[in-house]
Image (cartoon, rainbow, N blue to C red):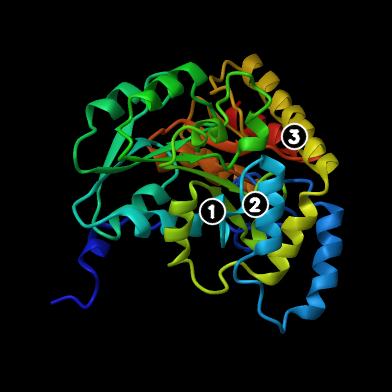
Amino acid sequence: MSIFRKELAGLKEYVPGKPIEDVMKEYGLTSIVKLASNENPLGPSKKAIEAIKREAENIHIYPDGAALELREKLAKKHGISMDQVLIGSGGEQILKLIAHTFVDEGDEVIFGAPSFALYDIMSSHIGAKCISLPLTEDFKHDLKAFEEHLNEKTKIVYICNPNNPTGNIMPKAELVDFISRLPESVVLMLDEAYFEYAIHDPDYLNGLDILKERKNTIILRTFSKVAGLAGLRIGYCFSSPEIIREMSKIKGVFNANRIGQMAAIASLDDDEHIENTVALNKQSLDMMKVYFNEHNMKYVESHANFIFVDINQSSREAYVELQKRGVIIRPGFLWGFENYIRVSSGTIEQTEIFIKALDEITK
C-alpha cells in the first residue's frame, strides 16, 4: 500500500520556466534574455524598492496576519469593502485556497485547455473530477461546451481572462451571456492575473462588475505581473464577505510576508510605473507582431504581457536553439501545440535580441 495520497499517482507536476542560471551554465553563456515567465522587464516600482529597504530592518517581526493595510488600500482603490479582499502568497495560494474551500471528493470543476495548469493540479489533488475542455479554433473558451457539462456535481468554473498561455480575452457579451445562465450554486472563478494589460480594451469584462450582482464569484489578481513583485509572492482575490471569511479559515496565520505586503502597498501609489509597464508591453509586442506578420507567422492577439505564436517549426527544437542564443521562451508542445511558442514582452533591447535569435533559427 502506498503511503501517498491516491490522487498524486495521476497528478502532473507543474513545470515552471527554466531558470536563467541553469541555461547560462548549460550553454556557457554570460548573459540571458528570459522571456518565459511573463515577468515585468521594468522590475518593481522605485517606491516598492524603497519600501522593501525600509522594511528589511523589521523582518524579525511577524507580518500582519490579516494584511489589514493592504486589504484596506485595495478595497478603497476598487470601491469594495475590506471584508471582500483576501491576500495570499501569490495567486498560486489563492487557487489552492479556492479548491480546499469548496471542493469535496467527487465534485466536478470545469476549465479550458490549454489554460493555467494549477486549476487542474489544485482541484484533482483533493479528489475533484476535472473537466478540461479544448479551446475553440480561434482560441476562445468554449462556453457552449462549459454549459453542456454543467450538472449537480459542478462546484467551480474557472475562466482565465486573459487566458494563459494564449493571451486573448473572452468578448464581454459572450462572457456575460454565459454567466447569466450559470447556476448560482456554482462558484465562478475569474482569473484576472493580467487585468491591467487587458482593461484598456472596451470589450474586456471587469470581474468586479459581475461580483456586484453575483456573490458566488471570485476574482483573482496579483502583484507578480504588472507590479513586478513576482519574487515576493503577493496575490489577492475579491469575493463576497461570506466566501472571503470561509477561505480565510485555512489561509494560514502569516501567509503573506512582511516585505511583500509593504512593497505591494507602495506599488499601489505608483500609477506611473503601471502606465510605463503597460506602454512598454505594447511596444514590445508590436515589434514582435511586425516581424511575425512579415514572416507569415500566425499569432493570437494578446491582451496580456506575452504572445502565443506559430513559428512554423518544432517548438521543441526552437526552445533549445533559442537557449543556445541566450533567449528563454516557453515551448508550445507543453500545451499540445507543437509549432507554437509563448514569448513574454521585454525591454526594447530584449525584444530585438529575441527577434534576431528567432530569425536565425527560422531561416
Alpha-carbon span between mark 3 and mark 2: 14 Å
Label number found at residue 91: 1
Q: List the residue tagged with mark 2.
A: 224
Mark 1 or mark 2, earlier in chain: 1
x and y percentages locating residue 350 in the rendered image: 76, 40
| Residue nearest the viewer, comparing 359 with 20 | 20
Q: Quadrant location of residue 114?
A: top left
Q: List the residue tagged with mark 3.
A: 278
Quarter of the image for the C terminus: give it.
top right
Helix, strand or loop at label 3? It is helix
Task: Relative to 321, say whether 97 is above or below.
Answer: below
x and y percentages locating residue 192 in the rendered image: 55, 39
Residue at image point 73% right, 25% down: 287
| Amino acid at dot 1 | Gly
Label number found at residue 198: none
Q: In the figure, is residue 341 to the left or right of 279?
A: left
Instruction: Say whether marks 1 and 2 touch (CB < 8 Å).
Output: yes
Q: Badge 3, how many Cα within 10 Å: few under 14, some, many 20+? A: many
| Amino acid at dot 2 | Ser
Task: Relative to 64, say whether 235 is above or below.
Answer: above
Alpha-carbon span between mark 1 and mark 2: 8 Å
